[in-house]
Image: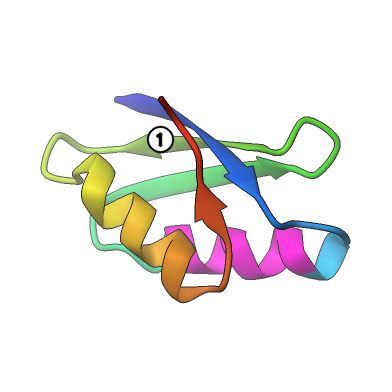
Amino acid sequence: MKTILNIEGMSCEHCVKHVTEALEGITGVKSAKVNLKHKRAEVNHNEAVTFDAMKAAVSEAGYEVVNT
């Protein structure tokens, strides 16, 4: 499965690394591609990974998921 997350609060490549590590630390996430310019992450994951789990990981890293 693929989920796109819109993320606010990123301002540099360190932020990208931090968000990537947070998302890839979730059991069941295969990969996360985080784009600073577009303020989004493309997360490839299995069906067991919930949107809420991804949102919580991003939040714990200090950023905000703003999907509607």
Q: Is residue 38 left or right of residue 4?
A: right
Q: Residue at x 59, y 59 (%)?
A: 20
Q: List x then y, in percent, for residue 41.
A: 58, 39
> Is 22 in the magenta?
yes
* Three-letter amino acid code at the position of disc 1: Asn
Q: Is residue 47 left or right of residue 33?
A: left
Q: Residue at x 39, y 28 (%)?
A: 3
Q: Which residue is mark 1?
A: 44
From the viewer's perspective, is residue 17 above or below residue 34?
below
Residue range corresponding to the magenta coloring: 15-23
Prevalent SS, magenta region = helix
Which quadrant holds residue 60?
bottom left
Q: Quadrant of the N terminus?
A: top left
Pick whichever, 23 or 58, lies toward us: 58
Which quadrant holds residue 12?
bottom right
Q: List x then y, in percent, for residue 31.
A: 48, 46
Q: Residue at x 71, y 65 (%)?
A: 17
Q: List x then y, in percent, for residue 4.
A: 48, 28
Q: In what element is the residue under mark 1? A: strand
Q: Quadrant of the C terminus?
A: top left
